[in-house]
Image: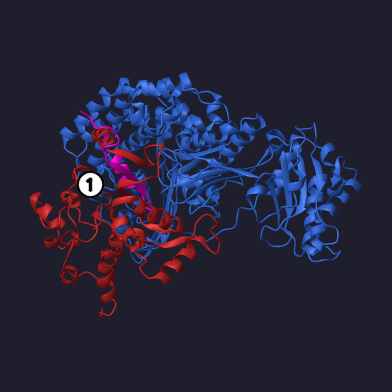
Chain colours: A blue, B red
Amino acid sequence: MKKISVDHLARVEGNGGISATIDGKIVTDVKFSIYEGPRLVEMLTLGKTPEEDVNIVPRICAICSISHKYAALRAMENALSVKVPAKVSLFRELMHLGEMIESHSLHIYYLALPDYVGFPNVIAMAAKFDLEVKIALEMKEFANHIMKTASGRYIHGENPVIGGFGKFPSKEELIWIKSRAIHFMPFVLKTVSLFCELDYPDCPEEDTVFACCNPDQNKYGIAGDEIILSTGEAINKEDYKSLTNEFVVSHSYAKHSRYKGEPYSVGALARVNNLGEKLKGEAGKMYKKYFNPRWKKNPLFNNAAQALEILYAFERIPKIIDKMRQLPAPAIVLYKKKDGKGTGIVEAPRGLLIHSYEISGGLISYTDIITPTAQNAEDIERYCYIAAQKLLDKGKESKIRDRMDLVVRAYDPCISCSAHMAEIKKAPLDDWRTKLDGIIKKGLPIFVGIGRGNRSDDRAGLELALELRKQGVTDVWLESEIIEVEAPWKNKPHRPLVFIDALDFKEKPGKMILLPLHYIFSNTVLSHKLLPFISSDMGYERLKNSFVLGIQPESIEEGMKISEPVRQALEKVLKQIMN
Amino acid sequence: MEKGSKEKLKIGIYELTGCAGDALLILDCEKELIDMFKAADIQSFLMAKSDNIDGELDVALVEGSVSTEREKEELLDIRKRAKTVVAIGICACFGGIQAAFLDKKDWEKNFKKVYGDKKMTHTKPLQSKPIDAYIKVDYYLPGCPIGKEQFLSTFNRILRGHPPELYRFSVCVECKWNENDCLLNKGIPCLGPITRAGCGSICINHNLPCVGCWGPVEEANLTSEFHLLREKGFDYDFIKKKMANFSGTGMADFLGELKGEKK
């Protein structure tokens, strides 16, 4: 067993690491660890006033501080029924776009580009890429200027408040920002070409689900009141938990999320994939020129998507300023309400950010904050796993470390966002029926029953296999019948492989779960019985198409009797398969 | 003539638990950044570069609070390697917002509410504390985040072997320089009198009260601020929470004494 790890991820924000454990020719585990300590930010807000919350929560993260402030303001204003005038909304959009440009340009030029051109950092890169570095510095400085104008300072400004702003900028200031944005356009277009034309490796490439805010008025945008998915589904912001389904993992102080049991991605790439068709102007032209189906599969294209969004932001700024200038500066909207519930969602530079609050008697009684990096964590691990296994299959083990580094960095993770509260939830239980149907649709599975015949509920896998055989299902095997060299799945990579086993996943007896086989490795609570069956020639294609159907046992004491809940579960599975 | 890298001061920039805002602020010194890298030998700066070295240092700039066992060990190692340690930002100076749970039991209870009984395998959590809870700190550069001007002046002075010269007065002084009207006089709860200057009284310049995010100024008259706010009609709990929001361990003694005081 050996471990390839990046202990201190460099050129990302905050403290984190990624590691892959390799056993022979199999990547048995990939972990995206967050060393950033627990800050319990949500707990800190309890008992505070809504105003204090808006002061505190942006401190979760410096680089997304404006997005945190904006999400908190939207949530509070929903809860307190505050409606802000148009000029306030426009000025907020301007500050939010400033943050988007600042964060994206910092990421693509300072943090990501050195990898693709072979330098350890942006300063060293300057020797050869003088113009690029100069553009990056100027662009970031301009974006910082916008944020300073809107929020009061570069980071953690307090000018945006519930109901409006402490102060609006002068006409001269707005005109300066507008003209500077226009002057920048040639460099912005160059940025888009540069990052869309980079040679992104084709590994890892695999479908995922993308989620982002659905902006109002059917336009491209970075805030909204609804979440849309690349599957075409839409989720109301108040129902955000049906998307995120958070759970605690033991190797990170940031919680992980899965949608319908599967990892999903948020961020610039999710936005461009879900909303790119709505881009207009130069951004629309560039989208048509560069977008291709690989963007839907390869997380490295997040760099290209961020460049495209910088262009979107630069085109949007002059329009916002023209509108702002026609409106008088409104006073802060005051409110009297002392109780309420509200959720606010925005797109932080690295993806969907959710703030949800309950206010009772003027003080906060419940806070839930879900950050983009926490949502991306599962997909980061999945893509790193895919990259590591594929490279291993091709005998390129030495490339794994750098490739994982590249994948993690492409997600632009913001590791500081390791706040959390909400009640503890167990890992999400997949709807095994739908998943099993999905697998069967792909092809008739090879079933393998696992278990010990003399250990009560641990017999379940064997019982089911025998029953399937009795019903005439072919290609059903028992654990004891498998000989490694001639495993029944050998040379049949396209036939799904389903192991049936009693798995202890800390649920009620009889509960069922269907997992991709490789998750077994990363969930140590589940089972180690399956490990011997993963013969060393099981490559990525085989593993991708292998699953475990687990049944929670009541008892695995010595004995021949299967408990009632497990017996009922077996009947359900049998019925499902025979249908 | 430019000095060879052997003669340049070896500097390391480290981030513990926090928002990484101080490191980001350093990256935000766009125009000065290249000069900084030229003037000093930046040995370690995870956010900015990947060729980092953990060796002997002249100066270590440390951001963030100590919130895990791993960070505690890292910090002890940094202290061993560095001649001078500078705490940058309120998380390193006072523990920051996450150090507001001053009572250990209170922290444990809240930790459990968030993470349940799940055993953390990667690193043991610790109640957030400022870095001087574990090591000797030579200089404190406050801020949330640190201010660009103060950082660059500190960086320059350290490069030349001088101690930093920081403002040792409260936000009120800067507020007067900026000719703002006093918000306290208008009955708005402002923490300017007890908060360390350096931000340029930015919130009051925007007609908003100081939230105290730079932490307490040396010898702040906390009792006076407390009674002043009481006189203005603010509730005991409200004032106490407001003073505790950003001060971490900085006002711990005062807030602890208040416990005994009659509401």
Res B115 seen here = yes
Q: Amino acid at mark 1?
A: Gly
**Location of residue A81 by image quarter:** bottom left
Residue drawn at the location 18% of the way across and 45% of the way down: B157
Q: Quarter of the image containing the C terminus of chain B?
A: bottom left
User: Magenta includes A110?
Assistant: no
Closest to the observer: A130 or A574? A130
Magenta part of the protein: which range? B1-30
The answer to whether residue A563 is left or right of residue A62 is right
Query: Percent position (x, y) of residue A136?
Result: 32, 29
Whether A273 is drawn above or below A256: the answer is above
Whether B129 is drawn above or below B84: the answer is below
Res B190 seen here = no
**Location of residue A153 by image quarter:** top left
Residue drawn at the location 33% of the way across and 45% of the way down: B13
Q: For numbered disc 1, what is the local secondary structure?
A: loop
- Say which residue label 1 marks: B147
The answer to whether residue A479 is left or right of residue B263 is right
